[in-house]
Image: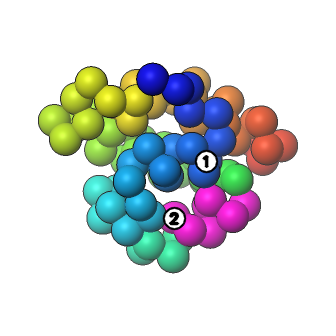
Amino acid sequence: MAEIKTVSDLVSAWGKPSLMAHAIGVSAGTVRQWKLRGAIPAANWASIIKAARSETFAGSKVAQITVDTLHRINTANGAA
């Protein structure tokens, strides 16, 4: 299982922007913008982690998302 290193990796692991958006309660356009910017606002991290913990992602790399992961992928792009 490859490590999630970027916002793009995270969105890809989720499947597609619309699936991620639906799971966390934002628009697909918002997720696409995060992917383009390479950053996710910290205000959205809790909803991402909560959705990633759902049974849908059990055993997947999405289920491994933590605050540290989100911080690292945002910092890697200079966005933290």
Q: Magenta span: helix, strand or loop, mainly?
A: helix
Seen as rendered, the residue at the extreme left is 55
Question: Where residue 64 sits: x, y (%)?
Answer: 40, 25
Question: Where residue 67 sits: x, y (%)?
Answer: 52, 29
Instruction: Using residue 22 as the reference point, say whether residue 10 is left or right of it.
Output: right
Is residue 65 part of the magenta span, yes or no?
Answer: no
Question: Where residue 8 sits: x, y (%)?
Answer: 60, 51
Residue ID at (51%, 76%): 29
**Residue 21 visible from this viewpoint:** no
Residue assigned mark 1:
7
Which amino acid type corresponds to the residue marked 2 in the rendered image?
A: Val
Number of numbered markers: 2
Residue ID at (39%, 35%): 62
Q: Is residue 61 above or below residue 30?
A: above
Residue assigned mark 2:
31
Which amino acid type corresponds to the residue marked 1 in the rendered image?
A: Val
